[in-house]
Amino acid sequence: MPVLCDTQIRELIPIEPFAEAVKRPGKVSFGVSSYGYDIRVGSRFKIFTPTPRTGGITIVDPKAFSEDLFVEIDTAERGVDHIIIPPNSFALCETVETLSIPRDVLVVCLGKSTYARCGLIVNVTPLEPEWRGKVTLEISNTTPLPAKVYANEGIAQLVFLKADRVCAVSYADKAGKYQDQRGLTLPKVD
């Protein structure tokens, strides 16, 4: 499975809005790179804030996920350029970019070193062939201190792996539950 280079990413991968990698002083870098694409975190975040419940401890359950475990923040509405993730917590967010993955490509997402060196880890499952939408990212603050994340700046790199053969069943064929998500999407179980 070869990795796509910058010219192939420009030609083969629909990314909107597409950005070239240029120097942006004072900003966490984003845009196409030699063998990947650095995506931006958008302005909408859901920050995990456990709240005490009557009768015991709150449990995070992917089969019965409660939206009240989060506080939603839109940095654009608040007129700020960042959010703060509490110590040992995490935030869900959406990308600025919308992607449409070709049938013969699998995408792996890796956190940017700028944030990793601050103890922030970005997690995304692979983007399967023919998946479309804005990517929902999880940013974990592994430190004992509050951490800043800057909206509309780079957060993670996508690496595009081109298959030697086209898959028999794509994400679109399976009618995947996260297909065509337009923004920040919480966990679902069908």
Image: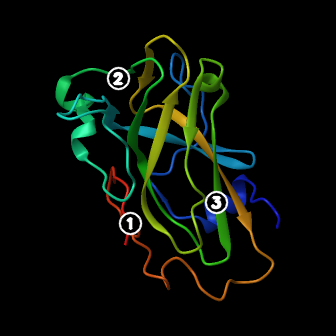
Q: Residue furthest top?
A: 145
The disc, 2 or 1, on the residue closer to the chain's N-terminal end is 2
Q: Secondary structure at mark 1?
A: loop
Crowd around label 3: few <14 · some 14–19 · many ≥20 (10 Å):
many
Nearer-the-camera pick, 35 or 183:
183
Amino acid tagged 3: Val
Q: Which residue is mark 3?
A: 107
Tell me whether the residue at label 2 lies in contact with that at label 1, contact meaning CB atoms closer than 8 angstroms.
Answer: no
Amino acid tagged 1: Val
Instruction: From the viewer's perspective, tell me whether residue 4 is left or right of residue 177.
Output: right
Q: Secondary structure at mark 3?
A: strand
Q: Which residue is mark 2?
A: 83
- Position of the N terminus, as image quadrant, is bottom right
Name above or below for residue 89 compared with residue 163: above
The disc, 3 or 2, on the residue closer to the chain's N-terminal end is 2
Q: Which residue is mark 1?
A: 189
In three-dimensional space, the C-alpha distance between marks 2 and 1, rounded to whole angstroms, equals: 29 Å
Give the label, 3 or 1, closer to the camera.
Answer: 1
Nearer-the-camera pick, 42 or 168:
168
Crowd around label 1: few <14 · some 14–19 · many ≥20 (10 Å):
few
Q: Secondary structure at mark 2?
A: strand
Residue at the image point whose x is 67% and y is 27% from the top: 113
- Residue 36: percent from left, percent from top: 68, 49
- Residue 152: percent from left, percent from top: 40, 33
Q: Quadrant of residue 164?
A: bottom right
Crowd around label 2: few <14 · some 14–19 · many ≥20 (10 Å):
many
